[in-house]
Amino acid sequence: MFGENGSNQSSLPIVPVQLDLDSTFSFTCDPELSCFTKCCRANEIILTPADILKLKHHLSLPSHELLRQYTVPGTIASTELPIPVIKHDEERNNCCIFLGDKGCTVYEARPVACRYYPVASGLFHNKDLESNEVFFAMIKEPVCQGHGLGPEITVRQWREDQGVAPYDEINSPWVEVVLKRKSMGPFINNISDKSLEMFFMASYDIDAFRRFVFFSPFLTIYEIDEDVTEKIREDDQALLNFAMDWLKTTLFGEGLLRIREQVAPEESIEVD
């Protein structure tokens, strides 16, 4: 889903033709097809911050419990940055743990990777323009019989029909953090374990990050406006955006959060 020249679907057969929002294709995912739900087996589905927010509310679980019950550790391609991956159910041919007898049991809150399928979405970091360019490609797995069926549709229409836009909007600040790390390449290859823990907590374990903000010396170290403090106390999306500003400040020195004068050094804050 992101990278300087690739996608998180790198292990899948992606047609090497770059698509844009107005590119057209036809595809149907129908329970009557014999391939129905086979794409939900033995595939690595990563969870983005937006997926965590949607799933934890859908399942009425705190983020740490969602991560414990339904995910295993993974890493983002070409980085050491951690990312949660949906567990496989080994007793059911390594299918997605959310797959039920009649299909996806969390369909309303299904991950963004599943919403995009069979489209692969990516970001290309253009260093010359200092911007990120969105691109798309088509995934064609031999097992899938849905290609070429149904009415022709544009990538733009597919994204709208599948409810992708809100996920991409929520994930945008996080993707910026990942691309900043990727753009550093091999010149910085020793991110500490503590920094990786910080990244994981701020990106995915949003409830732990809220405790970190309100029950550690955090608010005595950083100058946070009262209206921001009140908003992040209850609003998960606002808290995620705040967490990304904190990561950009601590990992990349961008100074988006102001540090109070005459306080203990930043390293004294412990990650929960």
Image (cartoon, rainbow, N blue to C red):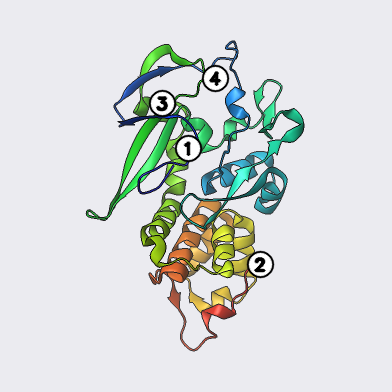
Secondary structure beneath disc 1? Answer: loop
The image shows residue 29, relative to residue 215, as above or below, that is above
**Outermost residue, bottom side:** 262
**Which quadrant of the figure contains the C terminus?**
bottom right
State the residue in front, 256 or 26: 26
Q: CA distance from mark 4 to mark 3?
A: 21 Å
Give the image location of residue 17, x and y in percent: 32, 29
**Outermost residue, right side:** 91
Residue at image mark 2: 272
Q: Amino acid at mark 1?
A: Gln
Q: Nearer the viewer, mark 4 or mark 3?
A: 4
* Disc with the residue nearer the chain's start (3 vs 2): 3
Residue at image mark 4: 143
Q: Name the residue located 50 percent from the left edge and 31 percent from the top edge.
A: 115
Q: CA distance from mark 2 to mark 4?
A: 44 Å
Q: Amino acid at mark 2?
A: Asp
* Disc with the residue nearer the chain's start (1 vs 3): 1
Residue at image mark 3: 158
The image shows residue 29, relative to residue 211, as above or below, that is above
Q: CA distance from mark 4 to mark 1?
A: 16 Å
